[in-house]
Amino acid sequence: MWLLDQWAERHILDAQRQGEFDNLPGSGEPLTLDEDLHVPPELRAGYRLLKNAGCLPPELQQRKEAVDLADLLKTVSRDEPEYEALSRRLALLELKLRQSGLSTEFLHGEYAHNLASKMKEAE
């Protein structure tokens, strides 16, 4: 994500220099970052308990595990015996994510390449 961070930071600094953030409503007031406005009021307490306990929704947990497996596979040689087992486990997770309706492009490195191309076009 460092490419996206650099791009965003550059645009923020440009906007600050041009004075686009001057005199905005709420300027100088503290931000309330933990509001769960998108969560129905009756579910907020439960969601906050799960969040504070470090629990993730199943799809995000599977995504995190898939990223960890993909990173691990990059360090394991194809000749090693555990490579095939890890590869099958990653393929199964990828299938589960697709069945959940989630994209798995993040596992194949295409996202970073596409993002870099878009950023170059925008300049």
Image (cartoon, rainbow, N blue to C red):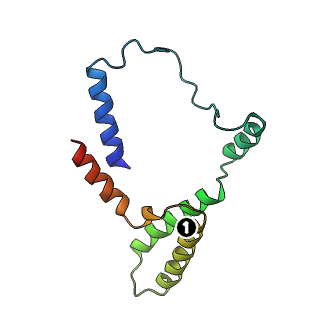
In the foreground, 23 or 31: 23
| Residue located 49% across and 62% down the image | 103
Residue at the spot of label 1: 98
Above or below, 61 relative to 15: below
Return the residue found at the far top: 23
Dividing the image into 4 quarters, which one contains the C terminus?
Answer: top left
Q: How many marks?
A: 1
Q: Position of residue 23 (x, y in %)?
A: 40, 11
Q: Position of residue 24 (x, y in %)?
A: 43, 15
In the foreground, 110 or 6: 110
Looking at the rendered structure, the kind of residue marked 1 is Arg
| Residue located 48% across and 64% down the image | 104
The reply, left or right, for residue 71 in relation to residue 7 is right
Return the residue found at the far right: 42
Picture quadrant of residue 99: bottom right
- Secondary element at image label 1: helix
The reply, left or right, for residue 13 in relation to residue 107 is left
Picture quadrant of residue 79: bottom left
The reply, left or right, for residue 68 in relation to residue 1 is right
Q: Position of residue 109 (x, y in %)?
A: 36, 64
Give the crowd class for mark 1: few <14, some 14-19, many >=20 residues within 10 Å. few
Q: Position of residue 111 (x, y in %)?
A: 37, 58
| Residue located 44% across and 74% down the image | 73
